[in-house]
């Protein structure tokens, strides 16, 4: 991480760490109380230090984004469970073979359920491929001449997130991943730019980093996490906490089936003009056209 302040007359933290390591070993210097506070994990991880950890989690990615000259981003949300077409087809082939090997009867229930899931996965794999294509289009048109605008940013995991990071990597562009520690294993996908691969403890700080530089949000089909991110962003735009930007719901058939936006208007819980906060798109090219029109971008390739 690049230094952001000029040299001063005071010793740096690194200087004092080096000096502390040279001190003789005595009961006093080996005591936990004697440790430099910022090197004392037992101290830093106490509940009372939560405000400090929140600030650190806000500062570290922000400073690294600045070091990497990230000017603006396009946020891609979507399910971690959606597969690429090749993997989905392979799973369907396996499921078809399993059903073919089973005799008719009640014992076929599991194999039949897996077959239906595999068919659905192949149908939905188009979203993976469209996210991948959209990221390629955005990255190759916006990351040029040393400029880092409209950099694709995702939650850093598999599925749609992997697809978007993958599309950027395929045109040798940078992309960002914001992973979070979860009870079950989650590792960053292999397509994130390594120096822009972050890990969070706090969902709230992670959400802030999604939106700090955002110029557009593209939301693919997803589950609870995707819905949370969508409604959080819509609420912030609706209440004027962040500036308006394109909010593109990818796949109108999915979204209109999952959320009855019209019913919210009929119930009076939102206004009819709140429906203008987002729009539906079906293809990567259509999504790019909306993003490009908002920021007067030209498609160069």
Image: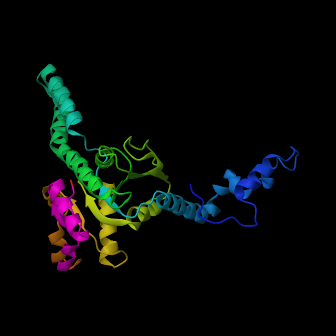
Left or right of residue 13: residue 289: left
Q: Nearer the viewer, residue 52 or 282?
A: 282
Q: At 17% from the left edge and 62% from the top edge, which residue is drawn?
A: 289
Give residue 230's quadrant in the image.
Answer: bottom left
Q: At 40% from the left edge and 51% from the top edge, which residue is drawn?
A: 177
Q: At 26% from the left edge and 50% from the top edge, which residue is drawn?
A: 136
Outermost residue, front direction? 145
Question: Residue 88, can we see it?
Answer: yes
Q: At 87% from the left edge and 45% from the top edge, which residue is drawn?
A: 24
Question: Residue 107, can we see it?
Answer: no
Region rendered in magenta? 272-300
Q: Main secondary structure of the magenta part?
A: helix
Q: Can you say whether 231 is above or below 45 in the image?
A: below
Left or right of residue 29: residue 74: left
Return the x and y of residue 121 as percentages of the image width and height: 20, 41
Return the x and y of residue 284 as percentages of the image width and height: 18, 54
Give residue 217's quadrant in the image.
Answer: bottom left
Return the x and y of residue 173 as percentages of the image width and height: 34, 49
Return the x and y of residue 147 as percentages of the image width and height: 37, 60
Task: Verify whether residue 278 appears in magenta.
Answer: yes
Quadrant of the rendering where the N terminus is positioned = bottom right
């Amino acid at each position: 991480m690049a230094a952001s302040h000029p040299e001063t007359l005071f010793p740096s933290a690194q200087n004092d760490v080096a000096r502390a390591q040279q001190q003789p070993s005595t009961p006093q210097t080996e005591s936990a109380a004697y440790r430099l506070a910022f090197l004392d994990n037992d101290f830093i991880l106490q509940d009372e230090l939560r405000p400090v950890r929140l600030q650190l989690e806000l500062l570290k990615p922000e400073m690294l984004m600045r070091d990497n000259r990230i000017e603006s981003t396009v946020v891609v949300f979507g399910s971690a469970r959606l597969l690429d077409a090749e993997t989905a087809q392979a799973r369907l082939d396996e499921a078809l073979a399993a059903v073919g090997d089973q005799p008719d009867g009640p014992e076929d229930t599991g194999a039949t359920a897996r077959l239906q899931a595999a068919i659905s996965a192949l149908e939905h794999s188009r979203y993976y491929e469209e996210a991948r294509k959209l990221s390629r289009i955005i990255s190759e048109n916006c990351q040029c001449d040393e400029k880092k605008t409209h950099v694709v940013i995702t939650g850093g995991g598999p599925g749609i997130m992997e697809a978007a990071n993958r599309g950027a990597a395929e045109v040798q562009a940078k992309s960002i991943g914001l992973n979070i520690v979860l009870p079950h294993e989650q590792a960053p996908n292999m397509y994130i730019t390594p120096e822009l691969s972050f890990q969070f403890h706090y969902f709230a700080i992670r959400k802030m980093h999604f939106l700090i530089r955002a110029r557009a949000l593209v939301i693919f089909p997803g589950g609870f996490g995707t819905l949370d991110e969508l409604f959080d962003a819509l609420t912030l735009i609706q209440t004027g906490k962040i500036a308006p930007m394109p909010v593109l719901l990818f796949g109108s058939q999915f979204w209109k089936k999952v959320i009855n936006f019209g019913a919210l208007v009929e119930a009076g819980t939102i206004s009819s003009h709140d429906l203008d906060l987002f729009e539906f798109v079906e293809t990567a090219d259509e999504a790019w056209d909306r993003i490009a029109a908002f920021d007067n971008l030209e498609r160069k390739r």
